[in-house]
DNA sequence: CGGCAACTTCAGTCATAACTGAAGGTACTG
DNA sequence: CAGTACCTTCAGTTATGACTGAAGTTGCCG
């Protein structure tokens, strides 16, 4: 059988081709994701939306990245869970469209906050329990107790520092980067 | 309390039992590892050595955590690659013994440095290339170029900030935590 | 109300990372 | 210099997480 002309590509489902630059960025971002415990596809979708000038519907994302529609659905749910992607309704289109947060400082803040909730807070709780239990257990646990306590205090310090950052006026965070050469001056004195 | 003599410890291969507290800490640490892209076993070994008062030989680690000797060998190599575990020769024992860095601030610094080398620096390079290529590609890439450039600048800022931290006198870093309530004062003014 | 489009869920498949045990190298030791 | 202890490497296996396609749900639209 002689298969003739390609699909004419009407309206919404036009060819979703990535520019070489976008491709390079998305692939790298996906790779970085895996290194930090984020699913590669999730990271790629995020990168794609971050580069996109307009909100994208899920099927277009699936076509562009060549993954299953269902996979995109799951990944978008996760990205919304991280609060860095949201639904952006488009007039006259029944499909849901998605857009990424574009302000990187804000994005950074939000991601840190989410990781705090999911990982730091539970860790502080568990280490606190460990220290308490080691205390009851007597002197045989004294060394371990001290080690865990130091870890706990370190993490708690970081947590405090983060909250300082968290509660700065939104625009102020950027200013922190002007710190160049000023960090030393913060030290006690 | 009847404090009877502890296990006679027949030379090197005595029973390697973990206290409940150590177990809890090690398991949690392993779990946190996976969330940040670190192999669970690698993280557990690190936790074990961190809690250990004395350097441990690989076979004892294997017995304690119930993993294969070869797995421990590989994992220790990786931990040494991260520069947070090192060999500590023990007089009269041919086996290599391993100890973890105990100073958490220093450990944090070293890990950040290593992640910078492995992930941040390559990312800065790739994003730089992306921006350059997007520039050549003309106005169709203008938006993507701007997004990537913002990301690049953000990461570069973080990088600079980290280097400030990195070059502080070793004991000084701890002082930074005293920042409570002082962060605001850093802002331009 | 029937049909369709958008979306989600989930059981099964697939890819990858992790782990094991056997084999081999090295160097100490009697 | 044979025997042993220690360590590493690697081919093969197992476990984990990621992904797919089919089936199901919802709600719009003619």
Image: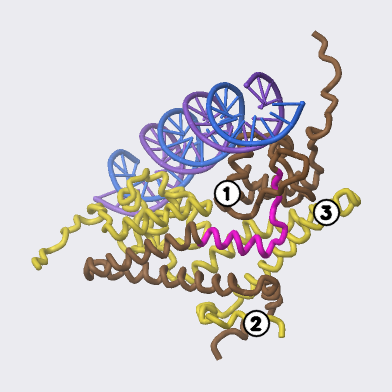
Chain colours: A brown, B yellow, C purple, D blue
Q: Residues within 10 Å of mark 3 (few under 14, many from 20)?
A: some
State the CA–CA distance, disc 3 to disc 2: 33 Å
Specify the segment rendered in magenta. Answer: A97-116
Quadrant in the picture for residue D27: top right
Q: Nearer the viewer, residue B94 or A100?
A: A100
In this view, B53 is above or below B164: above
Q: Residues within 10 Å of mark 1 (few under 14, many from 20)?
A: some
Q: Report if residue A105 lies within the magenta region.
A: yes
The circle drawn on residue B8 is none
Whether residue A73 is visible to the viewer of this picture, yes or no, is: yes
In this view, B127 is above or below A20: below
**Residue furthest top as drawn:** A1
Quadrant in the picture for residue B28: bottom left
| Residue A125 locus on image (x, y percent) | 39, 63
Quadrant in the picture for residue A107: bottom right
Q: Nearer the viewer, residue C5 or B30?
A: C5
Q: Report if residue B59 lies within the magenta region.
A: no
Identify the residue at image location x=16%, y=59%: B8
Q: Nearer the viewer, residue B68 or B13?
A: B68
Q: Are marks 3 and 1 in contact (CB under 8 Å)?
A: no
* Marked residue chain, label 3: B
Is the same chain shared between marks 3 and 2? yes
Q: Quadrant of the C terminus of chain B?
A: bottom right
Answer left or right for B78 relative to B163.
Answer: left
Identify the residue at image location x=33%, y=64%: A129
| Residue A74 locus on image (x, y percent) | 58, 40
**Circle 1 residue:** A38
Answer left or right for C26 relative to B188.
Answer: left
**Circle 2 residue:** B186
């Amino acid at each position: 059988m002689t298969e003739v002309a390609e699909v004419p590509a009407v309206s919404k489902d036009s060819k979703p081709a990535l520019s070489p630059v976008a491709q390079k960025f998305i692939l790298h971002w996906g790779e970085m994701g895996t290194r930090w415990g984020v699913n590669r596809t999730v990271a790629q979708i995020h990168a794609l939306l971050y580069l996109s000038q307009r909100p994208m519907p899920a099927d277009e994302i699936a076509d562009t990245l060549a993954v299953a529609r269902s996979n995109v659905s799951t990944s978008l749910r996760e990205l919304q869970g991280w609060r860095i992607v949201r639904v952006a309704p488009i007039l006259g289109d029944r499909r849901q469209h998605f857009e990424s947060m574009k302000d990187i400082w804000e994005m950074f803040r939000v991601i840190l906050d989410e990781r705090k909730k999911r990982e730091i807070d539970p860790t502080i709780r568990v280490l606190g329990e460990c220290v308490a239990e080691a205390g009851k257990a007597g002197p045989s646990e004294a060394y371990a107790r001290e080690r865990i306590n130091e870890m706990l205090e370190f993490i708690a310090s970081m947590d405090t520092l983060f909250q300082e950052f968290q509660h700065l006026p939104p625009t102020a965070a950027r200013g922190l980067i002007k710190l160049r050469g000023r960090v030393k001056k913060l030290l006690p004195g």
